[in-house]
């Protein structure tokens, strides 16, 4: 069963029949985390780096922003018994349009936001596939934690 | 027959957009026209009428009572909204299918089109732009060329993709180099064939701002910005990904800064269920 995660959305699961999947990341970033001991996984698809843009929106939907979405993702997996120290962490997306520079470069700013949050919280990224002009899809199989990345136009690759 | 000749021939094979599209567009762009003018052209098409009524009566809009005529629908929803629904119904017939060559699943190109049109509408409102219905329709139909070009892109994807990677050119430029024509040019020719206005043809041809752009061409700039935002949000995008150019000066000419850009994205993400609703429209 595929559990679809939309834009500004997050899902966690411990259902071994399930796969979490988020399509078409663009400049958005997909953060996939998995604890192999309890077989719990979570996938966040956030869109923007910083919730100070609009506190009310962040309250209504924390998954829109990196700084509110990432903590919410981790907490949701803890509720299912996952632990931070066992977590495998994969970061995908953050693409940019050609010549997109400075403040307008949302993809790059999204990625910098992830790095900053993980650095502060002592989380290591195990694998990342970010940047470029590519459109990416991420899938996680809950039964074994395998994570697959598909660059549009190509096949799924296990990472 | 050359590849380009074969492609051009397919424009003729494409069923022309029903005339009601032109009539509706002309009515809503004319400040002197009335609700009954709009109703009169829509009711001649029974299946279109039924579709628009079904959409209006869906729980999404939560109307206080069921509407059973176009006249009532216009009274509740307004002329602009009904015109948009008509245009979306007509456009969806071409764009809804899967387009494998661009790695677009069924509904993807349609999601992209509706999202672009709604974002363009929002920018028009913020900027009080002229010709909002023309801009809406151009944003909706700008990728109509992909409907024809996708089979060729599929066949020559590797060559196109390698060229994009190696030369850091846009996907559109690579299409032009490898196939001989790109989706924007092809879309413009479809719009010409369908007898849309010169302005509409111009916007579709230049929606990636490949030619020269002048500051007074606000319509093309808005469609371009809406398209760029959809790419960044990953809304119904395919194997061409984000391989198009970001023109900071055009965005600044519209007086949109990075915060505005993020706000448009955030507002749209919150309203995305409207797109899901409209895209699900039969």
Image: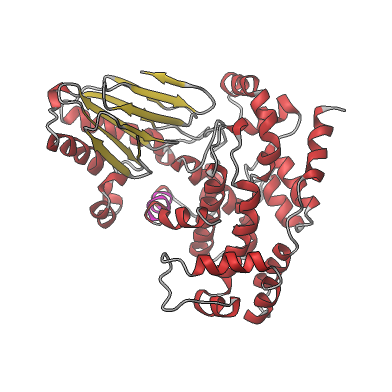
**x and y, in percent, of residue A29 in the image:** 36, 34
Q: Quadrant of residue A77?
A: top left
- The foreground one among B19 and B128 is B19
- Magenta residues, as a range? B260-267
User: Picture quarter containing residue B84?
Assistant: bottom right
Q: Can residue B138 be seen in this snapshot?
A: no
Residue B228 placed where, x, y %? Answer: 52, 44
Query: At 39% from the left edge and 49% from the top edge, which residue is drawn?
Result: B262
Quarter of the figure that contains the C terminus of chain B: bottom right
Image location (x, y in percent) of residue B260: 41, 53
**Residue B248 can be seen, yes or no:** yes
Is B42 rendered above or below residue B3?
below
Q: Residue at x 66, y 70 (%)?
A: B29
Rendered view: B255 above or below A85: below
Please name the predominant secondary structure of the magenta segment in the image: helix
Q: How is the image coloured?
A: secondary structure
Magenta stretch: includes residue B213: no
Q: Position of residue B25 (x, y in %)?
A: 68, 66
Reply above or below: B273 against B162: below
Q: Residue furthest right?
A: B1
User: Does residue B264 show up magenta in the picture?
Assistant: yes
Q: Is residue B278 left or right of residue A43?
A: right
Q: Is residue B280 left or right of residue B194?
A: left
Q: Nearer the viewer, residue A4 or B256?
A: A4
B29 to the left or right of A78 = right
Q: Residue at x 53, y 80 (%)?
A: B75
For the N terminus of chain B, give its image quadrant. top right
Q: State the count of labels.
A: 0
Relative height, residue B219 to residue B28 (above, below) = above
């Amino acid at each position: 069963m595929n559990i679809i995660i939309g834009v500004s959305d997050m899902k966690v699961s411990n259902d071994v029949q399930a796969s979490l999947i988020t399509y078409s990341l663009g400049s958005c970033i997909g953060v996939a985390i998995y604890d192999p001991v309890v077989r719990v996984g979570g996938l966040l698809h956030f869109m923007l780096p910083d919730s100070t843009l609009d506190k009310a929106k962040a309250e209504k939907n924390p998954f829109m922003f990196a700084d509110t979405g990432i903590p919410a993702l981790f907490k949701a997996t803890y509720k299912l018994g996952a632990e931070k120290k066992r977590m495998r962490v994969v970061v995908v997306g953050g693409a940019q349009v050609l010549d997109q520079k400075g403040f307008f470069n949302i993809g790059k700013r999204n990625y910098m936001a992830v790095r900053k949050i993980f650095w502060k919280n002592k989380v290591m990224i195990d694998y990342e596939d970010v940047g470029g002009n590519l459109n990416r899809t991420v899938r996680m199989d809950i039964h074994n934690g395998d994570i697959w990345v598909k660059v549009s136009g190509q096949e799924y690759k296990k990472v | 027959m050359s590849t380009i000749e074969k492609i051009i021939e397919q424009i003729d094979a494409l069923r022309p957009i029903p005339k009601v599209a032109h009539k509706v567009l002309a009515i809503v762009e004319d400040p002197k026209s009335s609700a009954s003018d709009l109703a009169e052209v829509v009711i001649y098409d029974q299946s279109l009428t039924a579709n628009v009524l079904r959409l209006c009566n869906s729980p999404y809009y939560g109307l206080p009572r069921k509407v059973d005529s176009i006249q009532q629908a216009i009274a509740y929803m307004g002329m602009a909204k009904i015109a948009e629904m008509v245009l979306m119904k007509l456009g969806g017939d071409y764009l809804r299918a899967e387009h494998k060559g661009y790695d677009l699943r069924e509904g993807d190109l349609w999601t992209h089109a509706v999202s672009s049109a709604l974002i363009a509408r929002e920018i028009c409102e913020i900027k009080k732009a002229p010709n909002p219905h023309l801009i809406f329709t151009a944003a909706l139909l700008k990728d109509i060329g992909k409907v024809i070009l996708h089979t060729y892109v599929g066949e020559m994807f590797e060559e196109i993709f390698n060229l994009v990677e190696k030369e850091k050119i846009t996907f559109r430029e690579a299409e032009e180099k490898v196939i001989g024509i790109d989706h924007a040019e092809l879309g413009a020719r479809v719009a010409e064939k369908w007898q849309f206005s010169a302005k509409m043809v111009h916007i579709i041809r230049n929606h990636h701002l490949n030619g020269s752009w002048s500051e007074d061409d606000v319509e093309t700039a808005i469609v371009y910005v809406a398209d760029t935002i959809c790419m960044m949000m990953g809304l119904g995008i395919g194997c061409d990904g984000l391989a198009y150019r970001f023109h900071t000066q055009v965005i600044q000419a519209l007086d949109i800064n990075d915060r505005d850009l993020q706000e448009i994205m955030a507002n749209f993400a919150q309203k995305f269920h409207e797109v899901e609703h409209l895209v699900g429209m039969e």
